[in-house]
Image (cartoon, grey):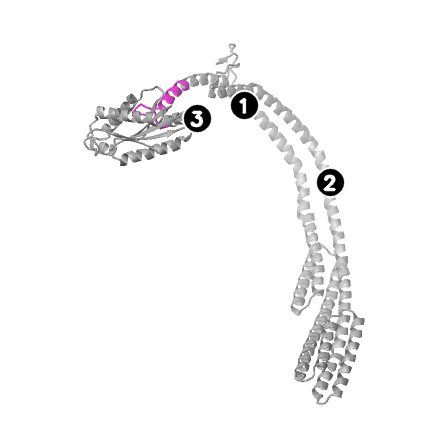
Amino acid sequence: MTTLSAKKVARVSLVKVFSAGLVGILFVFILLSYFTFTRLLSFESTLTDISNKSLPNLIQISQLYSQASKLLESTELLSKSSSDASKRLAEKQLQSNLMNIRNSAKEIFANEFLDTQINTISIELNEFSDLIEERLQTKNIIELLRTQAYELNLKAIDTERLNSSSWVLTFSQVSVNVSRVLNEKRLQRVRFSFNQLKEQLNELSAFSAEEQNNVAKRQLTEQFKTLLFSENGMESLKIQSLRLEGRALGRERFVHNLIVDYVTQLGFFTHQTELSITSQVASSVSKMKEQTQLIRLILIGGVVFLIAIVILFQQRILKRIGVFNQMLLSRSQGFDYQIELDGNDEITDLVETFNEFTQTIEIQKQKLEKLSMSDGLTGIANRRALDIRLEHDIELSVRQRSTVTILLMDIDCFKLYNDNYGHLAGDQCLKDVANVVCDSLQRDTDFVGRYGGEEFVCVLPGTDTQGAAEVAVNIIEKMRHKALPHIYSDVADYVTMSIGIATSKPTEVLTPETIIKRADTALYVAKNSGKNLYSIYS
């Protein structure tokens, strides 16, 4: 039970307390915001200068640094070019990178040294590109000569198809050695290998001179010598190719060092810009520390004022609301909570109103609970009460290892009754049938409820199938004695019922849904067997 303090004090409105506290907090907030805003304006100007000038320059320098690094990748790509297409692609990337670097450098720096460096890099890259072009052309000619050597080998094989193959085997061996020499990377090994090839070809010439009809062999041998050792033959081209490889490697390293130097200079300028930004930020932070002292004092005062208001709210409002909330929780759980609240304000008014309200609710709750468990038409238990009772009796039968049997009953031809006698007569028929069923039950533990429409259910705890059959027979007999007129029925001239029986046994415990489903199956059998009888589920 809730009680109020007997001592009445002067009434203090919580609205006024809240209003005064909010006004105070708002005043402190406005004062703090004003000083904070005025102090931040100077800091904003510094940040604006950094964001509009220093940071964009730093970003552009970083991008320029990245573009210069990509220049190294493009140079390496040009050096590894193995075809005209890959060379053109690498040159296109180089030209694009150089253009971007020049444009970015002009926007950021006015430095003649950096301009001279990038121009030098551009010139060296052009010469390096020409060197790569010459190297590719030499390789292409060598490949063409390699193809011609292959064709000469095929002619040699065709010449000796019908004769001895010793000459053609030697010729083919020379062709294989040519391919090996062309794959050699060292100049000394190339010179040595070509000397060996010259000796082998001389041996072929001598061999072909000893044979008759050797004109074709001598021609093929001389052509092979010309292909290898002429002024523009394979030997001179291979040596030229190796020299070009060496020059290209040296030029690539030179260009690489030039680009690295340029990137190093950019890194130096980037570092200088970072130092400038750091200096600006440090200066702004130092000023802000001085300017925030006053803001700190105002903030401390505001916090102290806020704490005082919070303590006041906690003692006069929150604590008492907590007690009131505890009372509400206890009442909602069915407990009677004893409290005592002092004061004379809105909270005490709420407590008094709540006490009156809970008393009214308790009375209405009891009435509503009784109505919620009853069928509005017949006055017996409704479907909700039936579900609760059936679940309870099955759980009890499990603990006691006993049986539970239900009877699912349906009025025969009830639609014809409603259609011909009217719905008001149908409602009265349902009431009369409910009374007959209730009168047929002999134990207080037996339960009857309306399942829905014209269907009723009897729950018989501790009853087996045989006992339930006796109850079903009793109900059918009482309906016959009641003799409610129903001349439109196709079973009898009075109202009859069909009954389905199902049992939950200790050896086969059924859920409420399963036992009702089985009873419904048995009811279906009773309906199909002529109605006005019962059927047991098996």
Examine the image and state in which quarter residue 437 appears: top left
N-term mark: 1 or 2: 1
* Circle nearer the viewer, 3 or 1: 3
| Of the pair 230 and 131, the residue shown nearer to us | 230
Residue of label 3 = 398
Element type at mark 3? helix
Farthest bottom residue? 212
The magenta stretch is 361-383
x and y percentages locating residue 288 in the rendered image: 70, 36
The residue that label 2 is drawn on is: 283
The residue most toward the top is 6
Separation of disc 3 and disc 2 at Cα? 84 Å
Dot 3 or dot 2, earlier in sequence? 2
What residue would you read off at disc 1?
18
Image coords of residue 13 (percent x, y): 51, 19
- Confirm whether residue 449 shows in the render: no
Q: Nearer the viewer, mark 1 or mark 2?
A: 1
Q: Within 10 angstroms of label 3, few (less than 14), some, or many (20 or more) residues?
A: some
Reply yes or no: does residue 374 show up in magenta: yes
Q: Given the image, on which type of amino acid does mark 2 rest?
A: Ser
Q: Nearer the viewer, residue 119 or 235?
A: 235
Residue depicted at x 38% and y 23%:
462
State the image coordinates of residue 527 (x, y, percent, origin top left).
Answer: 27, 35
Task: Say which amino acid is labelled 1.
Answer: Phe
Report the number of discs. Answer: 3
Please tell me which residue is depicted at 18% across the width and 31% down the height of the picture.
487
In three-dimensional space, the C-alpha distance between marks 3 and 1, rounded to whole angstroms, equals: 61 Å
Q: Secondary structure at mark 1?
A: helix
Q: Compared to 407, does 68 lie above or below? A: below
CA separation in Å, label 1 and label 2: 44 Å
- The residue type indicated by label 3 comes to Val
